Image (spheres, grey):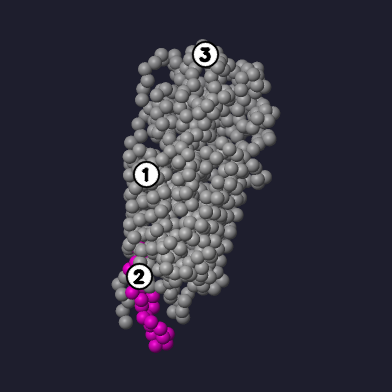
Amino acid sequence: MSVPEAAPPSVPPASASSPGPGPLPPDAGTATRVALVALVTVLAVDAVRAAGPVLDRAFAVSTVAVAGAALLTFLGAGLLAALLLVGTGRRADGTASGRTALAAVVALGAARLVTQAVHDEARFVAGLVTASLAVTALVLATTLVAGRAGGGRQAALGITLGTGLAAALQLALGTWDPLWRGGVLGTVVAVALVLLAVGVAAVARGETASGRPRRTWVLGPALALVVMVLGNPAFAASQSELPLLAAGTATVLASALTAWLLLVPRIMARPVRWASVGLLPVATAVAFLTTGVVALVAVLVAEVALGVVLTVALKTRRPAPPGIGRTALATAAVGLGLVVVLLVYLLDYDVPLGVDNAWVVVLASAVLAAGGLRFRSPAADATGREPAPPLRANALRFLVLPSVALLLVGWASAALAAPAPAVDRDPKAFVVLDWNLHYGVAAHTAVDLEQIARTIEAQGPDVVALQEVSRGWVLGGGADMLTWLGHRLGMQVAFAPAADQQFGNALLSRTELTDVEVVPLPYGAGPQERSALTALVAGPGGEAVRVTSVHLQHRDDNAATRLDQLAALEAALPADGPSVLAGDLNAGPGSAELDALGAAGWASAMDTAGAQDVLTHPSNDPEVRIDWVLGRGGITFADARVLADDSSDHLALVTEARLG
């Protein structure tokens, strides 16, 4: 008896000594189901990342308000799942149907497009509803696919391909998400994603599942890991300290490789499964706790390990007990597993845990890996064959092509970078711009990096000092602000990690940055790690000027810590030569901090150039001046002003410095 051409060669024929059915025909609907999970994963990653800047609005109230809003949002996914199951399903057992998945995807797509169109408070509400629906749609689509014979592998394939597609889409958009890109491009991309997802869900609406995986909860920590690490090119770039495109390309190709490996019939052999369970938390720890190429390799290993773990965890050899209520609770558990990881990790920067918050993600990956533990072989019969028709492997391999195409778009757009345009001004002038960017999030619930770039560009600065620069931070929407701004403005860039590798200070310069040094600052009373970034740039007449970007501790009662940080910075900086110090000092005029700087020879640009009354924070209604540009060593200031751009919660300062 011959094996059909499309069937894997490992499927043995029936024999007299091993009675049973012959080779099964390939499963013609596999590609559709895998594509459905992949596209819903992309929308889920997009929605969860968008929830970061959206939730930042609640920080104006309190940290407790942020935590409460986040918990209600993601736990609400369970209620939405119950409503969709009741409204679209004819089965009372709570098992997802194709119609239920279609309804969830349509609701998610509609909410996502509304979020794209509205602003301010309306975007806050729409963004959180979208995030909740994203979890619901991901659970229903995944359980629809996984709740079939051999569906665990198909669901894991979909999540893996979706992870790579999300990363590739970010690279093609310069690490922006379509929501924050805005304009025609952002809208077109958002509409295209929604229409594709709805179209595939419509094709799959006749599908049914025979059960739900008992370990549906693994989707929570898995989605957290994808959003923060595996589908986040900026994370890979900042941790590895490699260029964004190089690190991002590696993450996309790792997703493609994982998808190909999951199509290998024997990939679920016990040694591979057990190795993946151990490697997932170890690789996650290495990715967070180290830097350089080792961190990037760890990200790639974690991607492969996650694919194997999900394949095992999402099997339905023993389905979960039926019931709409049980499915709703499982969906709520997924939302809780996601939001607890993100919340505890990020709130550590305001309410310290006492240990490195990277261990939160490592613990989550360990719990996730435990979901992939199975002590019995997944084989269904004496032939060792899984209880499913063979996969159409060639058709599934083609699903990596969209990620590769988007990757090429990213490379092509990066090649179009141009140097900063020349400016016509006094050759003795040296323009310095300082701005705390608040990880790109404006008070009106937006991340508008293009507006930030236009504001900087209009001043024609020679050097830009930035604080609170995000490189993949979830609260900032996942964008690599450093790489994008450097590319957009045609300037040289340098970065100093502060709270972590994804959040810190930056310098941008028209000329080469040399003698670059990161100065760690004392932690003191906390609650956040701080640093300064210093480098030499070419000033007027080609003379080297040292420029430093700094951000001091922010709490009102942290004056003693700020003084210690300034002392550490003073000890690290050369005492001679022209120097400019710019940043968010979290201290106002007449404070002990400014007195200490004055005693060290620093003069304020605002005060010496006749702008003593300027205020810089908050940007929508300034009340205090805590952002400063200072100079010494022959630096004087001919002009200083505040820019009226509320793209951050701070206003930018621009000064014209001169030598002598």
- The CA distance from mark 1 to mark 2 is 33 Å
* Mark toward the start of the polypeptide (1 vs 2): 2
The amino acid sitting under disc 2 is: Asp
**Camera-nearest residue between 563 and 191:** 191
**Disc number lying in front (1 or 3):** 3
Is 19 in the magenta?
yes
* Mark toward the start of the polypeptide (1 vs 3): 1
Outermost residue toward the top in this view: 660
Could you say whether the residue bearing mark 3 is in a helix, strand or loop?
A: loop
Q: Is residue 133 above or below residue 181?
A: below
Is 394 placed left or right of 266 in the picture? left
Residue plotted at (35% across, 46% down)? 189
Residue plotted at (31% across, 75% down)? 4
Residue 151 drawn at (x, y percent): 43, 67
Instruction: Specify the quadrant that holds the N terminus.
Output: bottom left
The amino acid sitting under disc 3 is: Ala
Q: Which residue is mark 3?
A: 609
Q: Is residue 25 above or below residue 628?
A: below
- The CA distance from mark 2 to mark 3 is 74 Å
Is 641 in the magenta?
no
Look at the image and tell me whether residue 539 can be seen: no
Q: Which residues are magenta?
A: 8-32
Residue plotted at (50% across, 55% down)? 77
Q: Which residue is mark 2?
A: 27
Residue 87 drawn at (x, y percent): 43, 61
Is 620 placed left or right of 351 in the picture? left
* Mark toward the start of the polypeptide (2 vs 3): 2
Outermost residue toward the bottom in this view: 16
The amino acid sitting under disc 1 is: Ala
- Local packing at callout 3 (Cα closer than 10 Å; few below 14, some 14-19, many 20+) is some
Q: Which residue is mark 1?
A: 172
Could you say whether the residue bearing mark 2 is in a helix, strand or loop?
A: loop
